[in-house]
Image: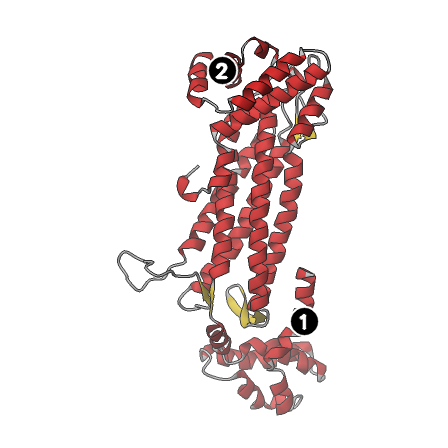
Amino acid sequence: MVPRYSRPDMTAIWTPEARFKIWFEIEAHATEALADLGVVPKEAADALWAWWRTNPAIDVDAIDAIEAVTKHDVIAFLTWVAEQVGDQARFMHQGMTSSDVLDTCLAVQLARASDILIADIDALLAVLRRRAEEHKLTPTIGRSHGIHAEPVTFGLKLAEAYAEFSRCRTRLVAARAEVATCAISGAVGTFANVDPRVEAHVAAKLGLAVEPVSTQVIPRDRHAMFFATLGVVASSIERLAVEVRHLQRTEVLEAEEYFSPGQKGSSAMPHKRNPVLTENLTGLARMVRGYVTPALENVALWHERDISHSSVERYIAPDATITLDFALARLTGVIDKLLVYPERMQKNMDRMGGLIHSQRVLLALTQAGVSREDSYRLVQRNAMKVWESDGALSLNELLKADADVTAALSPEAIDAEFDLGYHYKHVDTIFARVFG
């Protein structure tokens, strides 16, 4: 976790205090269920909750000091709680194993982190929709291979991003459900020393589903799917960030990040306004994707359990969720304040002498009876003259001067194929599909 790229609500989920509080809740709810089943005295559960209501503070340093001796974090925690609660604490952890606590706690943390990430996406979607509607019919050029292709609108670009992040949201909701499972099944997962009803009780109290079959751990394919989903969300962040970076290049300058009063772009060049936020998002996306492979490698554990996954998850669970939370919030801010330059968009579209209308002329020639091969040849030979003139020549005028073209199309018919509005006749249909 890097403070520079962290936000407090998400960071709070991963503090030692938060983790130990969840551990206590798991243990107390389990003891409560065991008491209901007559396995332990009711006074044991009452004593745990009574202490918790009056002394909720967690002494992390004291627990760490015990762990320095025991070399076992769960035992250190149980020992510290016993010191606080007294004799009734001996009934804690009856029939349970450490993984019951650790894995169920991780499920709670990942579920809570998911809720924040889903809210982040909702905020981003709201901004994307607002800006898409604002620029629904703002003409701009669509590019393939980085080269001018045909006209689109800037609103369509943002609608594409909205649709993509809507899919991200759906995947994240599914990933949350995938990972939010509880296992209180004891050593090797057979429930030999703890009744399955204890697991069901703890799951219900913590808002989790029951893990249908665990070994001594919750199966890590669930976690692999979760982190893979975070990686996909990060890639979608990068895709939109890269689009902004390209649009901000001096030669393009169709949109740019907001540049605040007093902001400096370069220590050496006072004129610079750099796309630093979206460049940062590209880097953060790389980090989140970097956590996917370790999560996939955690799936293959030895037999009923080993702890090769443990150290990995202590890194990637906080870092991936904290980083993605920050990145989503940053991207929302970028789009919210994005500076858009419609005049520059129009200027760029006009730069290449009407080449962006070449397909319409091609199709008109085929409709007029010219073969597709000949139509392509006639348009291309004029288009290449415009290209080689760097847009100084006009495709429209060259076509009107080409006897082979005018043999099939009148000057008026050629002019009609250069109507910019033609390209936007289905924008409403696309927006209805995206936004409903």
Instruction: Name the residue at 64% across, 45% down.
Output: 171
Mark carried by residue 170:
none
179 or 268, which lies in front? 179
Visible residue check, residue 290: no
Q: Specify the quadrant that holds the C terminus.
A: bottom right
38 or 312, which lies in front? 38
Q: Specify the quadrant that holds the N terminus.
A: top left
The residues bearing labels 2 and 1 have C-alpha atoms spaced at a distance of 67 Å
- Considering only vertical position in the picture, is 197 above or below 145? above
- For the view shown, which residue lies furthest in the left direction? 268
The image position of residue 67, as x and y in percent, is 45, 16
Q: Amino acid at mark 1?
A: His
**Which of the 4 quarters of the picture holds residue 51?**
top right
Instruction: Answer with left or right where residue 339 lies relative to residue 91.
Output: left
Q: Which residue is mark 2?
A: 80
7 or 205, which lies in front? 205
The image position of residue 384, as x and y in percent, is 51, 78
- For the view shown, which residue lies furthest in the top direction? 87
Q: Amino acid at mark 2?
A: Trp
The kind of secondary structure element at disc 2 is helix
**Which of the 4 quarters of the picture holds residue 270?**
bottom left
193 or 392, which lies in front? 193
